[in-house]
Image (spheres, helix red, strand yellow):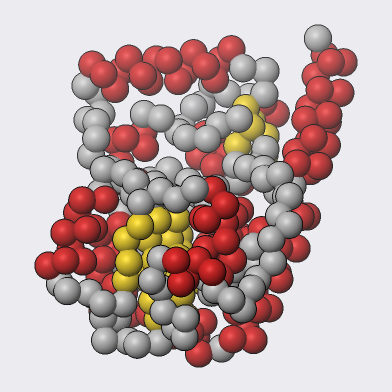
Amino acid sequence: MLKDIFPQNAVDIGLMKENDIIYKFFKYKEDLLYKTSTVIGCMSEANRQYVLNHNKGLEEQKVRIFPNTKRINSILSKSDTYEMRKKYNIPLEAVVAVYGGNMGKPQGLDFFMEIIKSNRDNKNIFFVLVGRGTERNMINNFLLKEEILNAKLLDSLPRDDYEKLVIESDIGLIFLNKKFTIPNFPSRVLSYFEYGLPVLAATDKNTDFGEMLVDAQAGYWSEAGNVEEFNENLSILINDKDKRKIMGLNGQRYLNENYSVAVSVDTLKSFYNEYSKVY
């Protein structure tokens, strides 16, 4: 299963230079891995097309769709007691937009800081950031310097606390670096879908993640860097509780139909049955 297209993703965000000896080493390893694989499972159609277009020697039949999977075992339900909001001093009355996960260069969180700054006086929204990564100190310093009052940065939480916090939130946030030329597909969205959160995403224009989100009617997408469009989408979700609920339910349904373990098992069986006849 191809989770990352490396080393090109590192080149895109400036962590590696194309044609450096380190790049050439990892590119050789990538080519060898593709060559020796019987099947290459890609997370989306755009991901698949990228692999085919940039690796001319690959047989088209060898490159398939095998998306991210999540075991759906949530027994938690939304509570009006807001246990986690109280525990972590998050306003009970505000619409809460949560970002959970890695805080690194691939996420392009400098754009998220622009969004927070542009909403600093908006008392109807509260941003919660949970996780660790290379950009965490930058985020912390930004929030302190700008004296942002409607955002909170939390360290990685115990799993139960994090899941309860997501359930008590109203919007799930996804960000990807706008410099990516490769079509990434952030797996974090699956947790948001599981717990019925509408998703607000800002990514590069090369991924088909936004198309999935719109097709599922489970959220809104805009290109990373476009503050105005992102805030327009944010405003819709802040002001329309019914739409948030409907989109959240759509996401849950889409998760069950496309990203459940059962779907992945069926896909693997199909691969096995097909290639066992050949080999």
Count of number-bearing discs: 0
Location of residue 139 by image quarter: bottom left
Left or right, residue 76 beside residue 47: right
Q: Quadrant of residue 48?
A: top right
| Left or right of 208 on screen, residue 180 | left
Q: Looking at the image, is 122 positioned above or below residue 22?
A: below
Frontmost residue, 232 versus 18: 232
Nearer to me, 217 or 48: 217
Q: Quadrant of residue 256?
A: bottom right
Which quarter shows the C terminus?
top right
- For image coordinates 58% across by 23% down, the residue present is 58
Residue 73: percent from left, percent from top: 73, 50
For the N terminus, give its image quadrant: top right
Counting from the top left corner in percent of width and height, residue 125 is at: 40, 81
In this view, the residue in front, 53 or 241, is 241
Q: Residue furthest top?
A: 279
143 w.r.t. 47: above or below: below
Q: Is residue 172 visible?
A: no
Residue at position x 47%, y 85% from top?
93
Q: Is residue 88 left or right of residue 77?
A: left
Q: Position of residue 84 (x, y in %)?
A: 50, 66
The structure residue drawn at horizontal position 16% and vertical position 66%, both measured from the top left corner, is: 144
The answer to whether one can see residue 154 in this image is: yes
